[in-house]
């Protein structure tokens, strides 16, 4: 028997308790539930008012912890709007698909919103399977339902739509009863839906701490510190991730846990510890849960055309690079926002890095490190022979870069993203991700500029 899969697409701007309740019911009725927050919509300009990074985070937070549910963020990452028929095509091989809609969309039968206003709506009404959830104020008559449908009667905790939640937030009216606690906390943390540009830097207090630990198992000191702090452990319902080790440990923690959308608090038992807090004499003081600085740091989105014909994508918090795979130099064309900037770059390779990653390989390759809040990212060359004296370039946050290998059969190139090898490639495309960030928490007195100064002016 084919798996029965519910597809729940929507703006979720923001996701309310009613959305979560619908998903919880679907998770009990179906083998799996796929939640798809939509990208920019021509008929709903309000979905463009909040950065997609925040919308992606809110969706992950709102639906986490529900069995057999996955949140798919491809629309937000690619800045597209996948309509119902496109979702049907995308997932049809996984099982029997049931598209979740409210009774407000089916009221009127063949004169309904679906039939009258959706692209190919009349065709989908006849051919697709729908799950119709009842909505207060809208009838659900049998003769007005799609031919293939299931009706699920919902007694929603709140009848408020996302538009009502947005309005209450904007007017500074109480809204906590309409969203989950964690969604409400995230909205407050970044000042979303207030009619102003949200900051990527804020302050917050974590009380009480419920900790998921990520520890460098190879470091005796890190293991010792983790034992001193084990009283804070809560692996079932954490509200932060405490990373104990060095910068490499933090990078591994982010790669594994960024979709949890929890703050990462690092305790340095390694060397530089640029991404972590210093270790205090008393480890419990090292993460004293007073007011903290919280930096929401972006990640790179990378697409690679493999020489095997497969296109792969990946995310990197620090950096991604392309380098020669043999003793011969690498020759590439470099485009920036579709404009050829370097027709022929010859050298050992090229690295793209975030501001947070600029203190790592980029610095060792000759680039100046950036403050983590710098609104930009770097391209850095490795042993560049042509053009002469070219070292690096600082790019704006919305920049797209593309590296095309010349004669990859003769001069092959290998790709690495976030320290992971992806084999031989003929082309790499890099930009800032529209969905992926990591929240790094630091003690209030920690001075990021001083950390950079220590790197640039060593004793």
Image: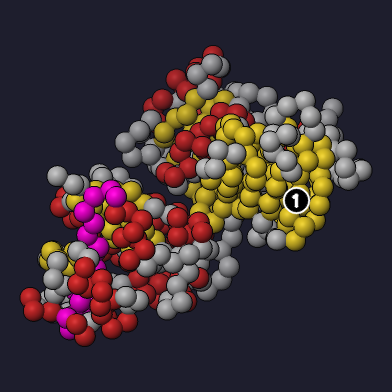
Instruction: From this view, report whether residue 406 is shown above or below residue 125.
Output: above
Query: What residue appears at the point 19 percent right and 64 percent down from the top-left corner?
Result: 129
Residue 345 picture location, percent across and down: 81, 44
Query: What residue appears at the point 59 percent right and 45 percent down from the top-left corner?
Result: 305
Residue bounds of the magenta highlight = 93-109
What is the total number of numbered labels drawn onto the structure image? 1
Task: Pick the residue in front: 55 or 92.
Answer: 92
Q: Secondary structure at mark 1?
A: strand
In the picture of the structure, the residue carrying the numbered disc 1 is 334
Left or right of residue 166: residue 151: left
Q: What colour-coding does the image apply?
A: secondary structure
Q: Quadrant of the N terminus?
A: top left
Q: Is residue 101 magenta?
A: yes
Q: Is residue 200 magenta?
A: no
Residue 169: quarter of image: bottom left
Task: Pick the residue in front: 106 or 346.
Answer: 346
């Amino acid at each position: 028997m084919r798996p029965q899969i519910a597809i729940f697409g929507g703006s979720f701007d923001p996701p309310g308790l009613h959305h979560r309740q619908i998903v919880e019911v679907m998770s009990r009725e179906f083998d799996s539930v796929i939640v798809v927050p939509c990208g920019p919509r021509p008929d709903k300009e309000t979905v463009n008012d909040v950065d997609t990074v925040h919308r992606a985070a809110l969706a992950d937070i709102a639906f986490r912890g529900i069995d057999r549910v996955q949140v798919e963020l491809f629309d937000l990452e690619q800045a597209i709007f996948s309509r119902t028929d496109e979702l049907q095509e995308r997932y049809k091989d996984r099982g029997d698909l049931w598209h979740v809609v409210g009774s407000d969309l089916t009221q009127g039968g063949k004169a309904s919103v679906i039939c009258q206003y959706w692209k190919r709506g009349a065709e989908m009404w006849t051919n697709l399977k729908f799950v119709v959830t009842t909505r207060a104020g809208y009838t659900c008559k049998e003769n007005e339902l799609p031919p293939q449908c299931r009706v699920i009667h919902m007694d929603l905790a709140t009848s408020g739509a996302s538009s009502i939640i947005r309005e209450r937030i904007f007017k500074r009216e109480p809204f906590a009863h309409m969203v989950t606690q964690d969604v409400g906390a995230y909205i407050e943390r970044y000042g979303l839906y207030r009619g102003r540009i949200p900051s990527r830097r804020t302050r917050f207090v974590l009380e009480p701490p419920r900790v998921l630990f990520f520890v460098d198992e190879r470091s005796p000191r890190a293991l010792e510190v983790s034992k001193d702090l084990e009283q804070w452990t809560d692996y079932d319902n954490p509200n932060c991730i405490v990373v104990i080790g060095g910068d490499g440990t933090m990078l591994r923690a982010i790669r594994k846990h960024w979709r949890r959308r929890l703050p990462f608090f690092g305790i340095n038992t390694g060397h530089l510890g640029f991404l972590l807090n210093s270790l205090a004499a008393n480890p419990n003081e090292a993460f004293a849960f007073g007011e903290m600085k919280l930096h929401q740091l972006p990640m790179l989105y990378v697409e690679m055309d493999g020489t095997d014909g497969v296109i792969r994508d990946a995310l990197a918090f620090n950096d991604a690079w392309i380098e020669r795979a043999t003793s011969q130099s690498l020759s590439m064309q470099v485009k920036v926002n579709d404009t050829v900037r370097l027709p022929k770059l010859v050298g050992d390779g090229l690295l793209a890095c975030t501001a947070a990653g600029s203190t790592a390989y980029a610095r060792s390759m000759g680039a100046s490190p950036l403050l983590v809040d710098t609104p930009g990212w770097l391209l850095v060359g490795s042993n560049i022979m042509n053009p002469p004296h070219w070292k690096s370039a600082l790019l704006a946050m919305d920049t797209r870069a593309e590296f095309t290998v010349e004669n990859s059969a003769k001069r092959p190139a290998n790709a690495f993203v976030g320290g992971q090898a992806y084999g031989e490639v003929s082309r790499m495309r890099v930009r800032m991700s529209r969905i992926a960030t990591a929240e790094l928490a630091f003690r209030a007195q920690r001075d990021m500029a001083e950390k950079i100064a220590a790197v640039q002016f060593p004793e």
